[in-house]
Image (tube, rainbow, N blue to C red):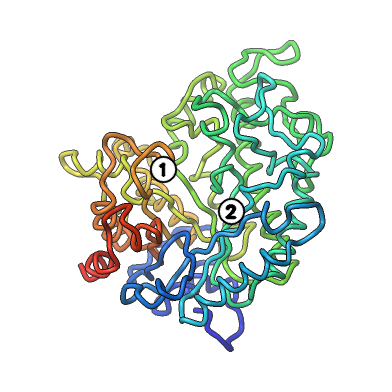
Amino acid sequence: MTTPGRPPLRALVVLLALVASCGAAPAGPGPAVPARAEPAWGVVDSTCAPERLAARPARVDVAVVEAHWDRLEPTADATDAGYAAGLRATVQRCLDAGVRVVLGSGLQYPPAWVRALPDAAVRDQAGRTPTNGAVDTVFSAAVADAADGYLRRLVAAVPADRLVGIRVGTSTAGEFGHPGPEASGGAFDSWWAFGPAPQHGQGLAPGQVPSPLPDWIPGQRTWQGRAVTPADARAWFDWYSGALVRAVADRARSLREAGYRGPVHVPAAGRGVLPAALDAAVAVVLDTAVRDGALRRGLDYVGDLPALAATVPGAVVDITGLDDATAVRARRLSPPQDRCTPGDAARLVGGDPSLDDWPNQRVTAAAAARAGLPTVGENPGPPGPTTGGTADSDSEADQLRYAVSYARGCGLSAFLLAFEDDLYTDRSGLTPADYEAAIRG
């Protein structure tokens, strides 16, 4: 735990950043049994408002405060002093009240001047750019350089040595992955790696490498006059997915160079591509789709999380959908499949046919445990399209009840309620007393 007057945590004890009673987390890849200590409890999108801090539920002492790139750096190479002061004051209020702070980096909110940089827009195989203005945070050197400059200013703007985490993602949702349906009008048909940088190395970000099959589009059976083999398709997907890890590692390196030494939280949505599903996709040279668009978003948690553990000291996996619709469906099966079990990490790569019935949270928790990475998690929030809600989604009251139980059962080091507003407004019907009761069980 980071407290006033104490030095920042070492990366090798990242689990202690949120739960004082837990032991040190493993520092690198390898089998791990999820910690069974009591999670820490917190809220997402906190204002650190004095009246809310005074009324917060007992034992809730972690807050995620979200920064915004477009507000801190509205023009190139310049900090908005007023916004910086306000952000620092917000963080300081929580710290002064004894609340530990995880800072959302806000990289998903690029300012207009970044969108205007040459080749800043990510492109898919048809030459389309995102409908929501997403920029290429993975492959573009210009965007990477701008992001690194922003992170330096962000670290300087807040008491970074007292933070217990900074969130780093690559997508427009602030999560790990290439753009999803929010960038393509609701479709899952885009592979977002077809600009000049990823395909031919023109303006390629440091640490990245160009496509191993330049100009090949997944599903095509030939490339430069020869047949495309499953091994070719595997190499291409490994490059596409691995680029996400390299991008996060580069952003984490920028944070370290700016003086931040604490944990780096990587928000992970969905469950990624299961090993058997990836094998099947590779066999048809990626001419297929996978549940929830994970293939085209490059989400391979089984393969990528060990690489993340090896390249990002202090990495923490943030499971962003505890008790999402997949958990609701898994809970209704006979027998139910929604609960994490001690053998999940081994079953994840053993070809167990029941994996198809596992909810997102169970798969991601198992992949993180297998990689030796600690986990935190949050519920989806108000059911609806913006949170992945479906007709099967739980109400927020049920999300709170079940997600708290899942956080304990999956060995998470913290549960973060999405969102703080839902405790202090009438939007959800929840109250601080409801959160307190859920924690008590």
Q: Which mark is residue 387?
A: 1
Q: Determine the residue located farthest toward the bottom in the rendered image.
A: 5
Q: Position of residue 265 (x, y in %)?
A: 54, 59
Looking at the rendering, in which quadrant would you find the C terminus? Answer: bottom left
| Label placed on residue 308 | 2
Asked whether 237 or 384 is in front, the reply is 384
Q: How far across and how far down the image is residue 183, in percent?
A: 57, 32
Left or right, residue 2 beside residue 424: right
Q: Is residue 431 above or below residue 120?
A: below
Disc number lying in front (1 or 2): 1
- Judging from the image, what secondary structure is the residue with disc 2 in? helix
**Residue beneath the point at 75% across and 25% down:** 214
The location of residue 244, given as percent across then percent down, is 62, 44
Residue 266: where, in percent of width, then height? 54, 55
Q: Is residue 162 above or below residue 267?
A: below
Type of amino acid at the residue the image marks with label 2: Leu
Disc number for residue 148 = none
Left or right relative to 21: residue 119: right
Seen at 52% across and 40% down, the residue is 300
